[in-house]
Image (tube, rainbow, N blue to C red):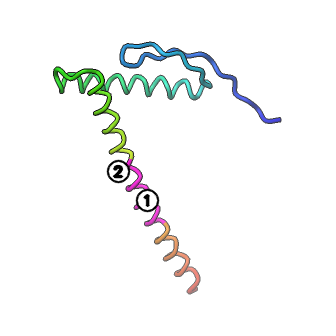
Amino acid sequence: MGLRSSKESIQLNLCGKSYNLKATTSEAHLLRKAAERLNEILDAKREHLNGADLKDLLVITAFDFVVNSLKDERELKESTDSVIALNKQLEEILNEN
């Protein structure tokens, strides 16, 4: 039987509302950091988009995250393709000798 990480109860504040979640110790750190970052982003957008309600701020923030995720995916694919091409070139060079 494998080792199982026990989960602890953590409380996160997201958009002024408190949420209780269960997470492992390593997950808890990541979740707290993510909640802090989300709140910072929303605060910055709230200042920049004066008068926007919370729903609009959340939609814009979610859209920004998706756009950034797609950019990251594209960059990762380009990097992976470059590594594969370089690996192929290296194998060809090594096979010549």
Q: In which image quadrant can residue 17 be found?
A: top left
Q: Is residue 19 above or below residue 73?
A: above
Q: Which residue is mark 1?
A: 77
Q: Which residues are magenta?
A: 70-83
- Amino acid residing under circle 1: Lys
| Secondary structure beneath label 1 | helix
Give the dominant element type of the magenta stretch: helix, strand or loop.
Answer: helix
Count numbered badges in the picture: 2
Q: Residue at x 45, y 13 (%)?
A: 18
Quarter the N terminus occupies: top right
Q: Residue at x 51, y 14 (%)?
A: 11
Q: In which image quadrant can residue 49 be found?
A: top left
| Secondary structure beneath label 2 | helix
Q: Which mark is residue 5?
A: none
Q: Which residue is mark 2?
A: 71
Q: Residue at x 57, y 80 (%)?
A: 94
Quarter the C terminus occupies: bottom right
Q: Position of residue 51 (x, y in %)?
A: 17, 20
Neighbour tally class for label 2: few under 14, some 14-19, many 20 plus, Cα within 10 Å: few
Q: Is residue 84 above or below residue 5?
A: below
Instruction: Between residue 90 and residue 17, name the one nearer to us.
Output: 17
Instruction: Of the two numbered discs 2 and 1 on the same chain, state the one appearing first in sequence.
Output: 2
Q: Is residue 77 above or below residue 44?
A: below
Q: Position of residue 73 (x, y in %)?
A: 41, 52
Q: Position of residue 95 (x, y in %)?
A: 58, 83
Magenta residue check for 74:
yes
Q: In which image quadrant can residue 91 be found?
A: bottom right
